[in-house]
Amino acid sequence: MANYETIIPTYIPILQKTPLFGTIDPADYPELLDFLQASVRRFRKGQMLVNLGDPFRHIGIVLEGTLEGSFENENFDQINMNYFQKGDLFGEALALANIEYSPIQLRALEDSLVLYLDPSVIYRTDAWDSPSKKSIIANLVRGLSLQNVFLNLKIRIHTQKSIRDKVLIYLYSLPAGPDGWKTVPFSQTALAEFLGVNRSALARELTKMKADGVLKTDRRRFLLL
């Protein structure tokens, strides 16, 4: 466990882009990090952050690296739910609910650095003695709402019968750049796992979609036509 006070100044630009801290003056970050009992921890590639059945006590923000969130189905197959990259928030719903047995597991896909926050202090209403602390509460509510939107997207994707429909629903959910192209934040293998399809079948369908004039691709970039 590293001392966050010596590390966080380097990562203030990342915190400013997170839904939790983005609306708050960076000058207030030290007070808020103390309030949320912040700590920083490094993980090696392949190391587990949370195992299935572990208690889930903290909200995390990825400062470096990439994490994979997954669970096991009734056949003990691993189902990948999401990938968390630099600046992403994870675990807020489970931590706020004080879950004793985590239904998901988290693994570092590469060497990673994670900022941990203890949300239990927000239940102490007597501690909400500054506008920035009240903003944290509001931002957490917004973050939970966005997470609910994401889970609804996952449900919609996984209820589609065709790979093409799964791909289109996911791509339409991504923001487009000024040139209209959309960037998928992970590899084609990870995309296949995210969509719940076979990688080879996904590759074949993407080739068909290009031939049909549905989209163009450039590695991880997609342009819907």
Image (tube, rainbow, N blue to C red):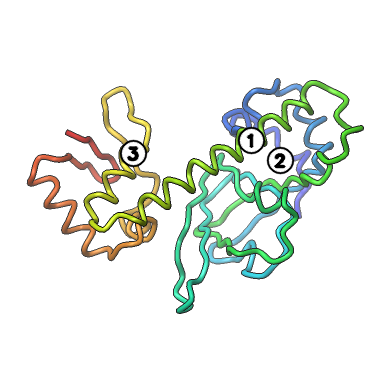
**Element type where label 2 sits in the image:** helix
Could you tell me how far apart the alpha carbons at marks 3 and 1 are, in whole angstroms?
Answer: 23 Å
218 lies above or below 200: above
Q: Is residue 58 left or right of residue 48?
A: right
Q: Measuring from the top left, give residue 7's x and y in whole percent.
A: 71, 40
Q: Measuring from the top left, give residue 137's x and y in whole percent.
A: 73, 32
Residue that carries the numbered disc 2 in the rendered image: 7
Tell me if label 2 and label 1 are in contact, CB under 8 Å. yes
Q: Measuring from the top left, give residue 48's x and y in whole percent.
A: 61, 66
Image point (77%, 24%), residue name: 132
**Element type where label 1 sits in the image:** helix
Residue that carries the numbered disc 3 in the rendered image: 183
Image point (27%, 63%), residue name: 199
- Badge 2 or badge 3: first in the primary sequence: 2
Identify residue type, mark 1: Tyr
Quadrant of residue 4 within the rendered picture: top right
